[in-house]
Amino acid sequence: MASVRTTSMCFVAAMAVVTVFTYSPLIRAQNAPQSGTKQSGAKSQGASKNQQAAPDHIYPEPVDYWKQTGTVPAKREQTRGGPAPRHDISGVWDPGEVGIQIFGAGSMPADGKPEHALPFTPTGLEALNRNKPNGGNGTASLTENNDPVFICDPQGTPREDLYEMRTTQIVQTPLKIYLMYTFGRVWRVIWTDGRALPKDPEPRWYGYSVGKWVDDTTLIVETNGLDERTWLDRAGRPHSADLRVEERFHRVDHDHLELSVTINDPQMYTKPWVALDKMRFESQPDDFDVREMICAPSEYQEYDKEVGDPASSK
């Protein structure tokens, strides 16, 4: 797509990689259900904890484009290492390749393994079967795919954690914490001023989030009021308006942060389940420049013309 600037194509390029792996016989074979395993009539749901089944060499390490141009003044090396600061998760954090999660939530990918089969309710199974992803273990073509992200709907919470989790900037104030995501170039607020979650709130793409420090280095975030049009992950796992999400941010030391995510939705799942288990982030320099990944409908139209039709005929 020579007519589209390279610097604006990151978002669509990411989806292109997903499509390539969906239609690759090797990748589909690697993620096929094991012989003799079933999941109550559901699509196969469920790579080991903290590790994606995808090859680990697809995506490069985070690159600061601004520094590549040579326009950033040279700075003294920052002092790094040491213990975690108290009640502080601020910084620029990158999870590396494990944050991409092409095959579904990092700790429960859709790889067909029995230990990754989710505890769906009958309602959850019905909702799952209405979703037609061409990622995860889904076999839908691009024309059949009904992933809302492909029409530039917001990912929402918790999918921002569970798909394309890239370099994330966290800013703290005395009253709230801002999470700024690369994918979609969106941000959300976690209130830390002691307020309670709202009762019967108007649904939002990113819901309503409150956080509480449970020790010097661990912040627990609860989120409700989420729009049920979003999917939980790339594998098409559904949720209802009753979804409650718990995020546990743990500052391991000065340079490392861990994120765990638990899903609790009694309408869709018979019990809570862990979607992320201590996904590890590494601190980046304060002057690290985060590249854009924005969903542009015009770019998707061009992408569908060049890629969508050929893929759907295979």
Image (tube, helix red, strand yellow):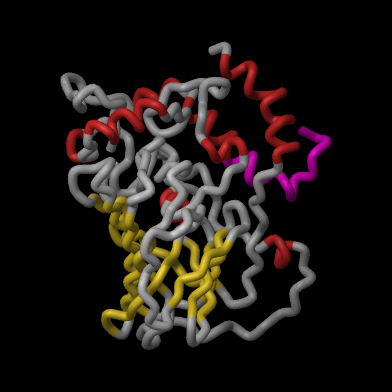
| Image location of residue 10, percent across then percent down | 65, 46
Q: Nearer the viewer, residue 226 or 157?
A: 226
Figure check: 101 above or below 145: below
Q: Is residue 152 left or right of residue 208?
A: right
* 284 versus 278 height, above or below: below
Residue 38 painted magenta: no
Q: Is residue 23 above or below residue 57?
A: above
Q: Position of residue 49 (x, y in %)?
A: 26, 50
Residue 117 shows in the view: no
State the image coordinates of residue 15 (x, y, percent, origin top left): 57, 37
Residue 95 in the figure: left or right of residue 300: left
**Residue with the most extreme front position:** 200
Which residue: 27% across, 33% down?
Answer: 123
Asked where in the image residue 125 lies, by quadrant, the reply is top left
Residue 103 location (% of width, % of height): 39, 38
Q: Residue at x 48, y 83 (%)?
A: 175
Count of numbered circles in the view:
0
Residue in the image at 37% along x and 87% along y: 86
Quarter holding the N terminus?
top right
169 over 79 or under it: above or below? above
- Do we see residue 265 in this rendering? yes
Which residue is pictured at 35% across the width and 23% down the height? 29
What stretch of residues is rendered in magenta?
1-14
* Extreme-right residue of the structure: 3
Q: Which quarter of the picture shows residue 102?
A: top left
